[in-house]
Image: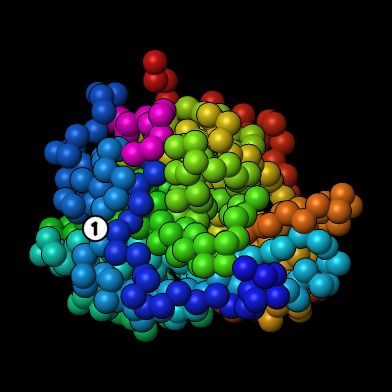
Amino acid sequence: MAENKIPYKIYLDESEIPTQWYNVRADMKNKPAPLLNPATLKPMTHADLAPVFCDELIDQELDDTDAYIDIPEEIQNFYKMYRPSPLIRAYFLEKALDTPAKIYYKFEGNNTSGSHKLNSAIAQAYYAKKQGLKGVTTETGAGQWGTALSMACSYFGLDCKVFMVKVSYEQKPFRREVMRTYGASVTPSPSTTTEVGKKILEAHPGTTGSLGCAISEAVEVATHTDGYRYVLGSVLNQVLLHQSVIGLEAKAALEKYDVKPDIIIGCAGGGSNLGGLISPFMGEKLRGENDYKFIAVEPASCPSLTRGKFAYDFCDTGMICPLAKMYTLGSGFIPSANHAGGLRFHGMSSTLSQLYHDGLMEARAVEQTSVFAAAEQFARVEGILPAPESSHAIRVAIDEALKCKETGEEKTILFGLTGTGYFDMVAYQKYNDGEMSDYIPTDADLQQGFDGLPKVD
């Protein structure tokens, strides 16, 4: 189809919303390593995981063979509130960069929670309700996952207990208030309300917290409260499965205009949006049907893929969760308070870690001042204020487009715009006032985290 026929926004019809999630693990030759029981170092079974997670979510977590899993009708109906989400041709950004590259972005911020996180939140709340639970516990970093889960729990009449990383709790009071508006309780982490929180505060007085800390507290409350289970917004296989609706929609929209991306880019913290965006495209690569260049973009201040170790590690700072084989900085790693936004997890999804380890994906670490420069450039020409997390992908998308300007290549770039940044104005203010600086951990800083890695043969 002719170039000038491609609209600024490509929308699918409501009937084209995916009715199945795609499980990329089914097509992986090298499957992600299993979660291990930290007490026995044996693979976690359904029975091991049952005290922590909802039953059907455990089945999804452990499923390495089924390529497609049906989306329940109730979840499909909820998706219609905000899906399909638009695939946008960044004509204005292309013009501003004077690049021959063609840039597309899948925008996931067009719902009240402001991000892609709702895709999995509604699924996890559905399975909790179906199981007859009273409520769920979770952690949140920048607050987007907690916001999405509070909405989903409100929809199904579930109680929602959120432990929010302390630095974000203090910097983003309005995102916190959205959670409370939807009925969630929000506690800054680490807190004095849990045993693990008290231990972390004793070991790290005055700490600004990390996702690893908040996970430990949420798991403790879930496992000590009748009728509750723990849910997680990233990292886990089940979450990447739910987020595959992003990539499935993006692929369908591109195919309407016979467009094939050369480069696919996503921001990477725990891996939820990146995994969701690339899954169906990665499936084609794994099956030998098509080839794509995938780029995971992470903050230089929390560089799990680019500087971490591929090893078994605890998913939480309190070391009460299963061991996952992933690229990790060590469960004791706590990002600098200077680090703005989310993408604060010390590790990376086991699925994405395996794909990266097998050379199927690249990774880049970018400094936050350059990220916010890209965010402002994008906002001024495309009209959307991006979340700091999403802006990592924007940074590298711009970099790749500028390379095309130098070489004259007309590459097609697709990136994930995971959410909006309207509750991240403290970070934008610091950037605009010239108070934002870059922090890159030294090798000695990282070694402290590596020294705490569990010994697994």
| Residue 259: image location, x then y, percent | 60, 60
How many labels, in total? 1
Is residue 19 found left or right of 388 in the rendered image? left
> Mark 1 = which residue?
70
| Residue 416: image location, x then y, percent | 57, 61
User: Residue 96: which quarter of the image?
Assistant: bottom right
| Residue 363: image location, x then y, percent | 64, 41
Q: How is the image coloured?
A: rainbow
The vertical placement of 36 against 441, above or below, is: above
Residue range highlighted in magenta: 26-39
Q: Quadrant of the N terminus?
A: bottom right
Is residue 321 found left or right of 8 in the rendered image? left
Is residue 199 visible in this depiction of the protein?
A: no
The residue at the far top in this view is 457
The vertical placement of 448 against 202, above or below, is: above
Q: Nearer the viewer, residue 337 or 397?
A: 397
Is residue 33 visible in this depiction of the protein?
A: yes
Q: Look at the numbered disc 1 and give the secondary structure of its residue.
A: strand
The residue at the far bottom in this view is 181
Q: Quadrant of the C terminus?
A: top left
User: Residue 451: which quarter of the image?
Assistant: top right
* Secondary structure predominantly adopted by residues drawn in magenta: loop
What type is the residue that disc 1 sits on?
Asp
The residue lying at 29 percent from left, 76 percent from top is: 78
| Residue 267: image location, x then y, percent | 59, 55
Query: Is residue 29 highlighted in magenta?
Result: yes
Query: Is residue 131 highlighted in magenta?
Result: no
Q: Residues within 10 Å of mark 1 (few under 14, many from 20)?
A: few
Q: Nearer the viewer, residue 106 or 389?
A: 106
The residue lying at 87 percent from left, 49 percent from top is: 407
The residue at the far right in this view is 406
